């Protein structure tokens, strides 16, 4: 299960699993994938006090030869909405249960 806040290592794991043909991804499109920027340094802007992270490196997974990935492929989209949050529902979890029921 993923959400739009999945970053860095989570995106790498999703990309690796998809490259190997392992599992399914359900939820929202993650915020990272096979390549992401990090190793950041934090700076505070002197007049406003705002803090910013400045990425200093790009990390990319090693793909098997001949495998190219365009981006994350979701087996089932399950976006989080204000309505579902107010009702106390977990759209991603419900989509997982639905997929399991369909495969029984």
Image: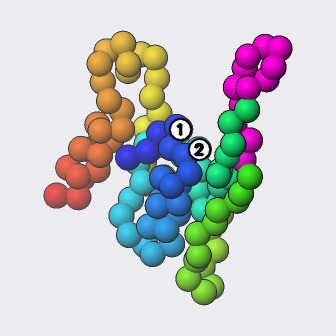
Camera-side residue of 102 and 31: 31
Number of residues whose C-alpha sits closer than 10 Å to that of mark 1, classed few (under 14), some (14–19) or many (20 or more): few
Residue 48, picture quadrant: top right
The reply to whether discs 1 and 2 touch (Cβ–Cβ < 8 Å) is yes
Q: Which residues are magenta?
A: 44-55
Residue 97, picture quadrant: top left
Residue holding disc 2 = 31
Quadrant of the rendering where the C terminus is positioned? bottom left
Instruction: Report if residue 46 lies within the magenta region.
Output: yes
Camera-side residue of 20 and 79: 20
* Residue 46 placement (x, y as % from top left): 81, 20
Camera-side residue of 15 and 57: 57
Farthest-out residue, right: 47
Q: Secondary structure at mark 2?
A: loop
Residue holding disc 1 = 4
Tell me what residue is drawn at x 46 percent, y 17 percent. Answer: 82
Is residue 69 positioned above or below 26 on the image?
A: below
- The alpha-carbon separation of the residues under discs 1 and 2 comes to 5 Å
* Residue 50 placement (x, y as % from top left): 72, 20
Instruction: Report if residue 93 lies within the magenta region.
Output: no
Is residue 62 positioned above or below 48 on the image?
A: below
Residue 31 located left or right of residue 41: left
């Amino acid at each position: 299960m993923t959400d739009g806040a999945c970053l860095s290592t989570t995106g790498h794991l999703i990309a690796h699993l998809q490259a190997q043909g392992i599992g399914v991804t359900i939820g929202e499109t993650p915020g990272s994938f096979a390549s992401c920027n990090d190793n950041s340094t934090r700076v505070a802007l002197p007049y406003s006090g705002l803090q910013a992270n400045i990425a200093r490196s790009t990390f990319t997974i090693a793909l098997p030869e001949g495998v190219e990935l365009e981006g994350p492929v979701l087996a089932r989209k399950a976006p989080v909405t204000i309505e579902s949050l107010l009702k106390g529902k977990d759209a991603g979890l419900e989509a997982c249960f639905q997929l399991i029921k369909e495969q029984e």
